[in-house]
Image (tube, helix red, strand yellow):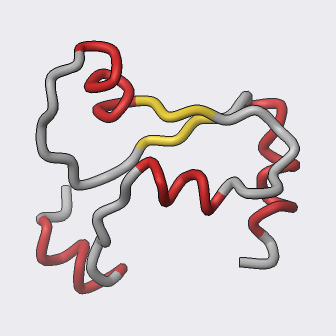
Amino acid sequence: MLDHNEIVRLYGPWPHRTPADAVDLFSGYPGLWWIAGGWAIEAFAGIPRPHGDLDLSIPRSDVGLLREHLKQR
């Protein structure tokens, strides 16, 4: 397993993302999508905590649709 520094060396720094970033990313996307993981748990529980990433989900059957949407980005 790679440590954090090795991942940053290979892929660059990981910017912090928020749900507003997801709204921007999926703007104009015609398929279903939702926020999962920590942000979703926070929204459900109402207990805020720090976040360093954003977990987005789509139906598996929409992968091609998402690829097409992201092709221009």
Question: Where residue 43 sits in the image (x, y, percent)?
Answer: 33, 24
Against 73, residue 30 (above or below) is above
Against 59, residue 51 (above or below) is below
The residue shown at (12%, 64%) is 3
Left or right position of 61 against 23: right
The residue shown at (83%, 31%) is 61
Dividing the picture into quadrants, the one containing residue 50 is top left
Q: Nearer the viewer, residue 1 or 28?
A: 28
Quadrant where the image shows the N terminus: bottom left
Q: Furthest-top residue in view?
A: 45
Against 38, residue 18 (above or below) is below
Quadrant where the image shows the C terminus: bottom right
Left or right position of 20 against 69: left
Question: Where residue 14 sits in the image (x, y, percent)?
Answer: 29, 71
Dividing the picture into quadrants, the one containing residue 34 is top right
Q: How many marks?
A: 0
Question: Where residue 44 sits in the image (x, y, percent)?
Answer: 33, 15
Against 40, residue 55 (above or below) is below
Q: Nearer the viewer, residue 30 or 66?
A: 30
Left or right position of 11 against 8: right
Question: Where residue 68 sits in the image (x, y, percent)?
Answer: 87, 61
The residue shown at (63%, 61%) is 25
